[in-house]
Image (cartoon, grey):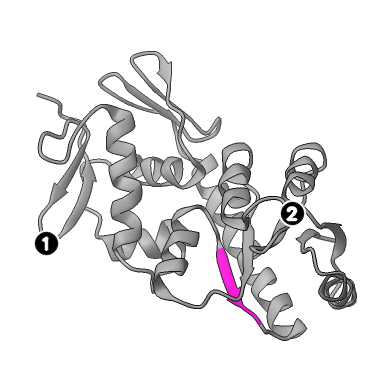
Amino acid sequence: MASVLVVEDDPVIRAALIEVLTGHGYAVKTAHQGFEALREVTQCPPDIVVLDLGLPDLDGLDVLRMIRGISRVPVLVATARDDDTETIRLLNAGADDYMVKPFSGGQLAARLAAVLRRSGPAEDAVDRQPVVQVGELRIDPRARTAHLAGRELALTRREFDLLAYLAAHADQVMSRKRILAEVWQQPYLEDQTVDVHLSALRKKLGEKASDPRYLHTVRGIGIKLVTSLS
């Protein structure tokens, strides 16, 4: 039985979600504030989080970013904010999916099941990859760590997933659409999603797009991690 943490401050909506998700076979825990949600994720990690953005103590987007700093747990955001800019912000901050209110209980249960299916196999595939050593860069998919010149890099979940994916396909040019389909498992996202994470990765690797060492952009085609360093 999968466990769901519902982060929702409205008691009526919270009660309705408990009833729906329990009826679909989920074990449900709840939190009505952001700090309470962070404590639950840290002390008793759920299998997935349903996160409302309008919380009384913290903005839900900030809660999402904090969760991503401490956990890989899948997060489905429930929001009334329906615009492309907000969607891109949520996905770039680490949301695995989002739903715009109002929605039915059946839709929510189906989305949760889909996110859980996507998150499990993708992470298992990464865990089977061997350690990759390129120059001073060492990527360990099983430990989910990356070190540069012996110093561990502080990568977000998506940044690590992107780096590990490029390492698994080293010296191959991977298109943004393929990366979105295989790393994010959401091919309908904008290419900008990849570029935002790529820019953050380059900064942490101490390189620039104009002067790359590891991550090279092939204009009009995609990105590759090179193993032949000059």
Q: x%, y% of residue 172?
A: 22, 48
Q: Amino acid at mark 1?
A: Gly
155 relative position to 28: left or right = left
Of residue 3 and residue 169, the one placed in the foreground of this image is 3
Judge whether 20 appears above or below 214 on screen.
Answer: below
Residue type pointed to by label 2: Asp
Quarter where residue 88 is shown: bottom left
Question: Label 2 vs label 1: CA separation?
Answer: 38 Å
Q: Which mark sits nearer the N-terminus, 2 or 1?
A: 2
Residue at horizontal 39%, vertical 13%?
150
Badge 2 element: loop
Q: Eyeballing the image, is 122 above or below 228?
A: below
Q: In the rendered image, which quarter contains the N terminus?
A: bottom right
- Asked if the stretch drawn in magenta spans residue 100, the answer is yes
Q: Secondary structure at mark 1?
A: loop
The residue identified by callout 1 is 220
Give the quarter of the image for residue 211. top left
Q: Please give the range of residues in magenta.
A: 97-101
Crowding at dot 1, Cα within 10 Å, few <14 / some 14-19 / many 20+, comes out as few
